[in-house]
Amino acid sequence: MVWRNGAGSLLFMEARTMQPVKIRILSTTKDEGSEAQASEQKYTGMMTEKGGKYYVIYKEDEQSGLDNTKTTLKWDDEHVIVMRSGSVDHRQEFRRGYVDKSLYQTPYMKIPLTTETSYVYTHFRNGMWQLEMEYTLYHDDKPYGEMKILIEVEKI
């Protein structure tokens, strides 16, 4: 099985090593001067491990606003990478203290974003992976909001 990430790189996954998984994403956004807004999305996808790194691939839906987009999560003990391709193309890396500059591309525009990660934690417990990230998102060098994301990945 071959997947292409948002940056055009190929990710090779052998179908026999892929395991079906449930994915639950809880996100909280706090814009300056407003109350926190929370959302939850649930997906099914496929997961594999290769060379000490874990990969989950799933398709976004209309609820996320990213219909027709494939998302790949890649992580290890120290960082998480989120790659999207389809209706949007975007690669975002989360590592404690890391500042990631990226380009969020839609069919209509390209939006420069900066992510400053303050917290990343990945752990496996009771048959479930939990990926936690906290970061500040900037657009045009101005803070856009404080973000917290919890991603739970569990084999089906």
Image (cartoon, rainbow, N blue to C red):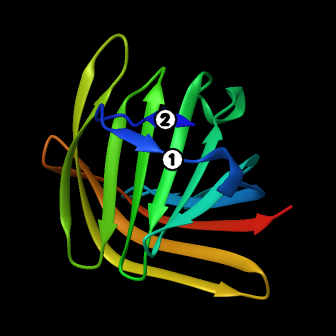
Residue that badge 2 annotates: 3
Please, which residue is most extreme toward the top here? 108
Q: Place residue 100 in its image quadrant.
A: bottom left
Pick the quarter of the image with the C terminus: bottom right
Which residue position holds label 1? 72
Residue contact between numbered discs 2 and 1, judged by CB atoms under 8 Å = yes
Whether residue 39 is visible? no
Q: Quadrant of the N terminus?
A: top right
Q: Nearer the viewer, residue 2 or 125?
A: 2
Residue at image location 77% in from the left, 68% down from the top: 154
Query: Which percent across, then down, holds residue 19?
Result: 74, 57
Q: Residue at x 42, y 26 (%)?
A: 88
Q: Secondary structure at mark 2?
A: strand
In the image, residue 87 lies at what x, y percent?
A: 48, 20
Q: Would you say residue 108 is visible in this rendering?
A: yes
What amino acid type is highlighted by mark number 1?
Thr
108 or 22: nearer the viewer:
22
**Badge 1, how many Cα within 10 Å: few under 14, some, many 20+?**
many
Tag 1, which secondary structure? strand
Compared with 127, 22 (above or below) is above
Q: 15 left or right of 82? A: right
75 to the left or right of 8: right
* Residue 68 position by quadrant: top right
Disc 2 marks which amino acid?
Trp
Residue 33, percent from left and from top: 40, 58
- The disc at residue 61 is none
